[in-house]
């Protein structure tokens, strides 16, 4: 039930830390544990099933529509969505045509496609690298609400961002990398 905001100057290691926690990079020293298992060993599959990582590159296929992107995401993860793809896009205020090719939409609309993935998977841990990138004030507010709801329901969010996050402070801590 907590959001940890990771802050620090460019190059301080925020993205690297998230990638290590996600199991995408091995740490030079130390370890990351989930359910008492090292996620860089025997606990990898368990943690990855409980985790969603959204990097600062939004992983949206430019030649697919928003719906096709989300359906492909679910297929790759091998899960059935918690809600319908169209409902997830509506919840993040995706306003482009559902038939529009993602590559023809704005950077903010692509980010909304990526963020809609949060609503499709039922995982405990969100690892988000600069989730507010390219979003307007409405988009930022939507992400803050998603974070609040996730934490309030017992979820964990680690968020690397230079921007302030406006959610109930009882759910939030901040660490600074130097």
Image (cartoon, grey):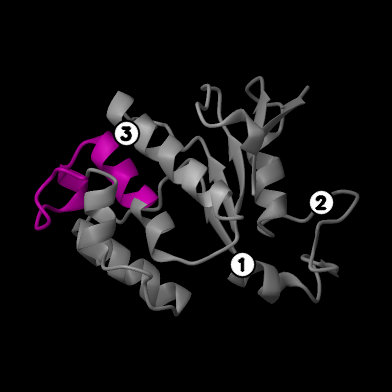
Check disc 2 and report the residue beneath it: 27
Q: Earlier in the sequence, mark 3 or mark 2?
A: 2
* Residue 98: percent from left, percent from top: 12, 56
Q: Is residue 147 above or below residue 12?
A: below
Question: Do we see residue 1 in this rendering?
Answer: yes
Q: Earlier in the sequence, mark 3 or mark 1?
A: 1
Q: Is residue 6 above or below residue 68?
A: above
* Residue 114: percent from left, percent from top: 36, 50
* Residue 50: percent from left, percent from top: 61, 67
User: Quick one: 102 or 128, which is closer to the camera?
Assistant: 128
- Callout in the foreground (2, 1): 1
Question: Do we see residue 136 in this rendering?
Answer: no
- Callout in the foreground (3, 2): 3
> In the rendered structure, which segment of residues is drawn in magenta?
94-115
Secondary structure state at the residue bearing disc 2: loop
Q: Is residue 162 above or below residue 144?
A: above
User: Quick one: 3 or 31, which is closer to the camera?
Assistant: 3
Residue at 69 percent across and 74 percent down: it is 46
User: Quick one: 136 or 25, which is closer to the camera?
Assistant: 136
The residues bearing labels 3 and 1 have C-alpha atoms spaced at a distance of: 25 Å
Check disc 3 and report the residue beneath it: 139
Checking the image for residue 50, the label placed there is 1
Side (left or right) of 119 relative to 31 = left
């Amino acid at each position: 039930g907590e959001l940890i905001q990771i802050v620090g100057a460019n190059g301080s290691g925020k993205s690297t830390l998230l990638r290590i926690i996600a199991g995408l990079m091995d740490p030079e020293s130390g370890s990351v544990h989930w359910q008492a298992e090292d996620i860089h060993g025997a606990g990898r599959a368990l943690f990855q099933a409980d985790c969603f990582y959204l990097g600062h590159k939004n992983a949206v296929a430019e030649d697919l529509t928003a719906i096709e992107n989300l359906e492909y995401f679910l297929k790759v993860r091998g899960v059935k969505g918690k809600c319908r793809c169209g409902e997830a896009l509506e919840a993040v205020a995706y306003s482009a045509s559902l038939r529009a090719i993602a590559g023809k939409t704005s950077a903010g609309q692509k980010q909304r496609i990526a963020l809609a993935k949060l609503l499709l998977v039922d995982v405990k841990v969100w690892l988000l690298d600069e989730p507010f990138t390219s979003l307007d004030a409405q988009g930022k507010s939507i992400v803050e609400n998603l974070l609040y709801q996730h934490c309030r329901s017992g979820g964990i969010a680690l968020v690397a961002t230079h921007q302030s996050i406006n959610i109930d402070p009882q759910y939030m801590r901040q660490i600074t990398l130097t």
